[in-house]
Image (tube, helix red, strand yellow):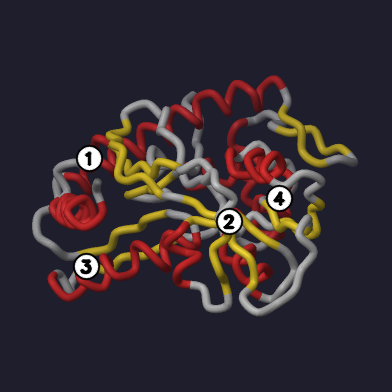
Amino acid sequence: MPLQLEWSDLPIFLAIAREGTLGAASRRVGQSQPTMGRRLRALEGAAGVKLFQRTADGFVLTDEGEMMLRHAERMESDAHALARELAGSEQGLTGMLRLTCSDWFGRIVLAPVLAAFNQRHPCVVVETLTDPRVYSLARREADLAFRIAAFDEPEVIARRLTTVSYALYAPAGREVPAQDVVVMDTGFGGMPDVGWLMQAIPGARIVARSNSREMQARLCALGVGMAVLPKPLGAATVGLVEVDLGDAPPSRETWIAYHRDMKRLPRLRALVDMVIDSLAD
């Protein structure tokens, strides 16, 4: 007898498998914990097996759960592929586009381009995501992505967009110890500018960290310490002056990418073309 599964319960199962707790999974899919628990019990009842072991540390997949995970991920991938192909065949410059980039790049570099795009194509709504999370193009979490590292995801069309120069900045009109610096958070401690800064300033003392370039620029302007920043951000931030140590920090390349299934989508093509025309070097 075939399984009588409710297919809409599979995203619930995937969220719990990936997050490990009902609380985190409920936030991921936007449903309440009681609803998540009820739908999981219904799925296990329909499957006739336990999919998770309930432990003190959270939900752990059983052997049957591992089996279901393989098939559910394959079904999810097929569903996303279908959605991308259907979206890629849409005609007309209407609808929504979701793009992801860093906070400063969105505000300083992309915002003027998006404003011009809106004037030209007012029926296209562009949603910009600027948090540090890496959004998946394959899962349609974003339609267009800008990153400072080359893309290695399969089936992604990517190209180098532009090279961004960096400089060392200090607060204007404020006295700060010459060794005090503001750098990236520990998760990004291997960034080229961090290594350059620690070598360029002997005895440099890290006084603040942030994964946001905007926050680093603001802290620097308020006198917390010197910081290496992208030049477009440094120039746009009030209260900063550029410091020349004779050797500039390393520049970074910015890449633009989208999934190949979306290449025929007119509104995406129009935005990509405008971005390249405006920013590519």
Q: Which residue is mark 3?
A: 124
Image depth: mark 4 or mark 3 in front: 4
Image depth: mark 2 or mark 3 in front: 2
Task: Tell me the distance, in whole angstroms, between the alpha carbons under discs 4 and 1.
Answer: 38 Å
The amino acid type, in three-letter code, at marker 1 is Glu
Disc sitting over residue 119 in the figure: none
Disc sitting over residue 185 in the figure: 4
Image depth: mark 3 or mark 1 in front: 3
First-in-chain label (3 vs 1): 1
Q: Which residue is mark 2?
A: 168
Residue nearest the viewer, comparing 29 with 52: 29
First-in-chain label (2 vs 3): 3
Image depth: mark 2 or mark 1 in front: 2
Q: Which residue is mark 1?
A: 85
Q: Secondary structure at mark 4?
A: loop
Q: Quadrant of residue 89?
A: top left
Residue 245, compared with residue 4, is above or below; it is below
Please indicate, yes or no, whether residue 16 appears anywhere in the rendered image. no
The amino acid type, in three-letter code, at marker 3 is Val
